[in-house]
Image (spheres, grey):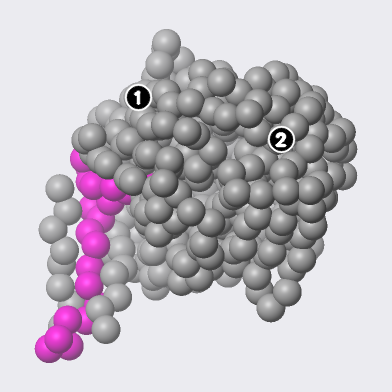
Amino acid sequence: MNVEKYVINGGSPLRGEVEISGAKNAAVAIIPAALLVDGVCRIENIPQISDADMLLTILSHLGSKVRFVNRTTIEIDSSSARCVDAPFELTRKIRASYYLIGAMLGRFGKAKTTMPGGCNFGVRPIEQHIKGMTALGAEVDVRNGFVFAEATEGCLRGARIYLDKVSVGATMNIILAAVTARGRTIIENAAREPNIVAVANSHNPRGAEVRGAGTDTVKINGVEKLHGGTYTIIPDQIEAGTYMAAAAATGGEVLVKNVIPKHLECISAKLRETGTIIQEYEDSVLVKGAKHLRRANLKTLPYPGFPTDMQPQMGALLCLATGTSVITEGIYDNRFKYVNELRKMGAEIQVDGRIAVIEGGHELSGAVVQACDLRAGAAMVIAGLCAKGETIVEDVHYIERGYENFVGKLRALGADISVVDFPDDDGTEKIISVS
C-alpha cells in the first residue's frame, strides 16, 4: 500500500505571495446546511480540502444533487434529499459530521449519524450539542458509537438555551436546527467566532432570521422554509495564520492575500511580540520575519482571544525564539501531543497539563515526525522548513483535511518540499508531481 509523506529540506526563507482559500470551519457547517433549503444553494470560495469533499459525498448519498460550477463554486439542490443513514465510513473520519444532526433534524425531524471523527487531541464531547437539540424538543440517544435524534413532536420548537461552555460547534449546530424550528430560539453564552457570523450570513439571504451572530447571544426566529441563494465563504483565518507563522519562523517575507485583517488581529499581535513586522492592507497582510525572534507567552481563548487552532504553529515558531516562552492551552486538555515530535528535532519543551514551557533559541534538525492532527501537522511542516537537513512528515492526510494545496502553495513561496509516495510496487519511493 502506498503512503504519502512530505519530504522537506529546510533552511530557505519563504518569499512571495500566497492566496488564502475559503474557511474550512465555515464551509463544513455551510455545506450540511444546504439540506435545509428548498431550492438551489450556490456556495462560492469552497476550499478544496478532504473534509469538504467528504461532506459533499455524504449529501449526495442523502439524495442531494451536487454540481461543480468551477473549481471553487458548487451548487447543491436538496429538494429530493431523503432521510437515510449517513455513510459510516465517511462520517467517522470527520469532526464536522455532527452538523448533520442539526441539519437533518431541521429538515426531516430525525437524524442518525456516527459520533464525530477527525483529529484526536483530547476529549471533545458533544454534550453541548445534545443539550441544545434536547432543548429544541429532540430525543437524543448515543449508543454503540452512533447518535440517534428525533423530534418528539414531529418538529423542533424554539427554546432558550444556555451553553455551559463556549462552543463553536454547538453554537453553529443549534443555529442549523433552529432556523426552521417553530418559534424563537435564544442561544446564550454563544461562541463569537467569524465562522458563526458566516453561518448566519449564509442563512439570512435564504429567508432565515438569525440575529446577534458574533455576540454572546444569538436569536433565531424559526421560519417554515428556506429558499435558494448564493453565499461566498469567508477567508480561512487559520490558514492565513499558518502562512504568517511560517513566514516569521523562516525569516522570510510573504504577502498573505484574500484575508480579513480584523479576523487576524490576535495572531498579528502575538507575532509582533516576537519581533515580526506585520503590515495590514485592505484584504492582505505583509509578514516580514525578524532576524532574531523574541520569546512570547500566549494563552488560547475563545474568539477574539488567541485561537487554539494556531497554538501548535506558534509552538514551532517559539522553539526558534531566544528565551523562555510559555504556552497555556485554555480550550482543550491534550493539545500538546506534537511536542514529542518537536523534541525529535532538538526542541527543548516541558509540558505540565495544559502548560508548555519552551526553552527557545536552539537550532532544529531534520527528523522523521508525525502529523498528530491537522494543526500539529502544520506545525511539523513549519519546523521542517526551519530545520537543518531533511524532515519527513508522516500521516499527512490529517493536514490535507484543512489546507488546500498546502505543498503547492509552499513551493510557490520557495520551500523545498515534496509529496513522496512510500513505497511504490517495487519498494522504492516515488516523487509525486506538485504544481
Q: Is residue 251 visible?
A: no
Q: Which mark is residue 426?
A: none
Q: Is residue 348 above or below residue 379?
A: below
Say what secondary structure mark 2 lies in: loop
**N-terminal-most mark, 2 or 1:** 2
Q: Please name the residue shown 14% across and 86% down the image.
A: 425
Looking at the image, the residue that sits furthest to the front is 154
Element type at mark 1: strand
Residue 181 bears which disc, if any?
2
Q: Position of residue 245 (x, y in %)?
A: 47, 39
Q: Is the residue marked by circle 1 packed among few (<14), some (14-19), or many (20+) residues within 10 Å?
A: many
- Residue 370: percent from left, percent from top: 46, 69
Q: Check disc 1 and give the amino acid type.
A: Lys
| Residue type of the residue flagged with mark 2 | Ala
- Indicate which label's residue lies in the foreground, 2 or 1: 2
Residue at x 80%, y 34% (from the top left corner): 158
Q: Residues within 10 Å of mark 2 (few under 14, many from 20)?
A: many
* Distance from Cα at disc 2 to Cα at disc 1: 39 Å
**Residue placed most toward the observer, 113 or 344:** 113
**Where is 140 relative to 267, above or below?**
below
In the rendered image, residue 404 lying in the magenta stretch gets the answer yes
From this viewpoint, is residue 262 visible? Answer: yes
Image quarter of residue 79: top left
From which residue to which does the magenta span run? 402-427
User: Which disc is residue 257 wearing?
Assistant: 1
